[in-house]
Image (cartoon, rainbow, N blue to C red):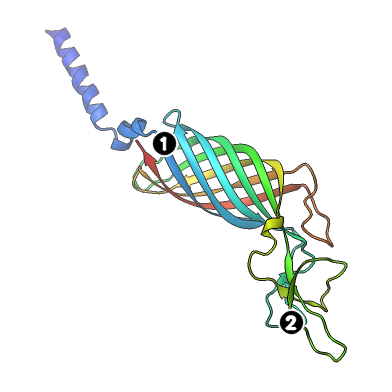
Amino acid sequence: MNKLTVIILVNLITGMCFGQLPAKQVNSVALKTEVYGGLVMHTSGWGVNLNYAKFITVKTKRMLTLDMVTMKHSKEIKIQGYVDQNSKDFGFGKLNRLFVTRIGYGKKYLSYEKQRDKGVNISWHWNVGPSFGFLKPVYLDVVNITPNGRITTPVQEPYNPEKHNLGNIYGRSKGIRGLAETKVIPGGFVKLGLEFEYNDDREFIRALSVGATLDIYPKEIEIMAYAKNTFIYPSLYINLLIGKRFF
């Protein structure tokens, strides 16, 4: 009878302990994937991203990522045209605009799990993969001044530092002129980040991610005419994220 009583008590206590576990701990193993993304703001521009993660364990996930961001030169500044102060501002000396698309693989690790609904999950992640630089020529509205002092109608021309100056640049061109002349420069990237997830519902994702990214290309990318260009682009970023987990 004593042995039977002990066995019954052990079973009751074990059942009570498991019954006291939060629902998120009991059911979290059923979650299989998550899809989330949002707005990226970094030290050289801005953009958007999309992430797909698959659970390996409760605290480890395999990631596929897609980032699409703009990338500015560190010496780039915008000024107003001298010909007409109402014209669109432009980056003087800027030859090309750089847009970066990253396709990454990585992993995310849950370092700290929140202990209550209003808490914060803290994770860190790494991603590596190809980085494609899309280099689009800059087009400007250019005018000429006739011998009698009249200004001609602005025409769109690709910026040429030997031909264009503050005396004949009217302003930045409108539209997508130069898109067909875009060059693709393949490279690679590595990204490290820290993610703070603060949502109440475990099936939905609301998070803030901060970290650093390094894009590297096989040659210097020609962005500016009057400044040194580089093939290495480090940046710090902040990422606002929303998404959903799936069973």
User: Which quarter of the rendered picture does the N terminus lie within?
Assistant: top left
Report the front residue among 244 and 156.
156
For numbered disc 2, what is the local secondary structure?
loop
Residue drawn at x 21%, y 27% as measured from the top left: 16
Residue depicted at 83% across the width and 79% down the height: 167
**Coordinates of residue 187 in the picture (x, y in percent):** 71, 41
**In the picture, which quadrant includes the C terminus?**
top left
**Residue 28 drawn above or below residue 9:** below
- Label 2 environment density (alpha carbons within 10 Å; few <14, some 14–19, many ≥20): few
Q: Residue furthest bottom?
A: 148
Which element carries disc 1, helix, strand or loop? strand
Q: Residues within 10 Å of mark 1 (few under 14, many from 20)?
A: some
Which quadrant of the figure has residue 229? Answer: bottom right
Determine which quarter of the picture holds residue 97. bottom right
Callout 1, which amino acid?
A: Thr
Distance of label 1 from label 2 (alpha carbons): 57 Å
Is residue 192 shown left or right of residue 161?
Answer: left
- Select label 1 or label 2 by which is in front: 2
Residue 132: image quadrant is top right
Give x and y (percent) for residue 62: 50, 33
Number of labels in the image equals: 2
Residue beneath disc 2? 153
Asked if residue 167 shows in the view, the reply is yes
Residue at 25% across, 32% down: 20
Above or below, comparing residue 134 to residue 128 in the picture: below
Q: What number is the disc on residue 33?
A: 1
